[in-house]
Amino acid sequence: MQEYQGPATMEKITSLAKRRGFVFQSSEIYGGQSGAWDYGPLGIELKNRIQRYWWKEMTQLHDDIVGLDAAILMHPRVWEASGHVENFTDPLVDCKKCKARFRADQIDPDKLAKKECPECGGELTDTRKFNLMFKTHIGPVEDTSSVIYLRPETAQGIYVNYKNIIQSNRMKIPFGIAQVGKAFRNEIVTKNFIFRTCEFEQMEMQFFVKPGTDEEWFQIWRERRWKYYEKMGVKMDHLRWHRHGPGELAHYAKDAYDIEYLFPMGWKELEGIHNRSDYDLSRHMQYSGKDLKYIDQDNNNERYIPYIIETSAGLTRSLLMLLCDAYDEEKVADNGDADDIRTVLRFHPNLAPITVAVLPLMKKDGLAELAQEIRNELREDFATDYDQSGAIGRRYRRQDEVGTPFCVTIDYQTKEDQTVTLRFRDSMEQVRVRRADLVQRIKEEIKNYKRIK
């Protein structure tokens, strides 16, 4: 089996993320909150860019997909109908000695049979079911009638609105509904930085199709989602398909594949593509008493419950994937200095939190003022940064470390002939460009970008 061979480790990624303002531990000054993370200035920019990139791919580029933003709090019966109240559980064991908590299905079967803790060898408790939904109360009185859940997934908000969208937007099958939103899972074990957390964001699209056409559409969406990652500039040899076997299939699934990514900690799920059959709409018809059948007016008013093809990706998990995928270390000098290593994030320019950094060679002689003028010209089209502190080489390295694809340096020649130095992150090549042509040149470079490594 292929093992991760890249320069990134989770320790390096976690350190860079905090040092450069991508991700911070939630409530860190109080010792931190397990399973929760805050996204700093660069982290929220990267997260927003991933979200916009996905949203464009799913809605702007498809005539048959529309968007939705459903509420986090939903009627409790939704989660009974979906099967979450009954089935959304993990087997849990605790160690009586070291007090660590584990999922029983992730412990070596021999140790589990002996009730032996995998960490300290102490005695484990009996296995018990643990529901992953966060439960709270709504209203002034806390009793069984006021119970409500924080949604564990965004998909159910789409299903309960499917008929509203058909009627209000005159949608015809096949069509899809896309949504990005927060979900909450009371995970037994949160680990590997932001890979598995209690609070996260999902990017989901549910595609409604006529029964009998579902297998064809399932293959179509598998192909489309694979090409999406190619467009993102991800290392495709770090992606693979994993098909769910009979013991892995969720209770609602007819067929399911995961796109897995080779993280530093091994192959892990990045996105799921599922054929959910008519399970969801059938259950909501049963529990709500409402008719959710589709009326095909183009086919003699034929009535049927649509099948659903789901694509479901974690936004925060995609951010971690991009950090790991983009991370690189390389020797930049041939002078025998083994310590002359630069750290660089090779983000696609469409995803980098900063597109262009503007750097005056000196603070004096009007160069800083001129650099600010040029930055103002660029910021209408690009996310920009400005840095005038330290040697120019050190400033380049700072921008490399956060993944800025282009740096524009303003020097004394700029004052003479209105040209600037445009530096490329990946190759470190530098060219002179006329100030008047700078915006168009950067746009062309983004359009034609090809990753070097």
Image (tube, rainbow, N blue to C red):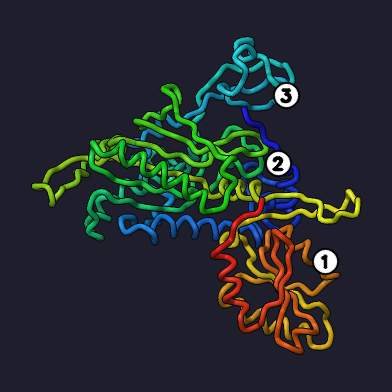
Asked if the residue at tag 2 contacts the one at tag 3, i.e. Cβ–Cβ closer than 8 Å, the answer is: no
Q: Write down the residue under mark 2.
A: 6
The circle on residue 98 is 3
| Relative side of 101 to 397, left or right | left
Q: Is residue 450 above or below residue 96?
A: below
Question: Which of the two labelled residues, at mark 2 and mark 1, occupies the earlier sequence position?
Answer: 2
* View extreme (right): residue: 336
Residue at the image position 71 percent from the left and 16 percent from the top:
122
Q: Does the rendering let one see residue 137? A: no
| Residue 276 % position (x, y) | 34, 36
Q: Amino acid at mark 2?
A: Gly
Disc 1 on helix, strand or loop? helix
Marked residue nearer the N-terminal end (1 or 3): 3
Q: In the image shown, does 23 or 57 lie closer to the viewer?
A: 57
At label 1, which amino acid type do we have? Gly
Question: Does the image show residue 321?
Answer: yes
Which three-letter amino acid code belongs to the residue tagged 3?
Answer: Cys
Q: Position of residue 142 (x, y in %)?
A: 45, 43
Q: Report whether 395 appears left or right of 407.
A: right
**Residue 120 versus residue 290 in the image, above or below:** above
Image quadrant where one finds the N terminus:
top right
Percent from the top left, x then y, of residue 62? 35, 57
Which mark, by number, is residue 393?
A: 1
Which of discs 3 and 2 lies nearer the camera? The answer is 2
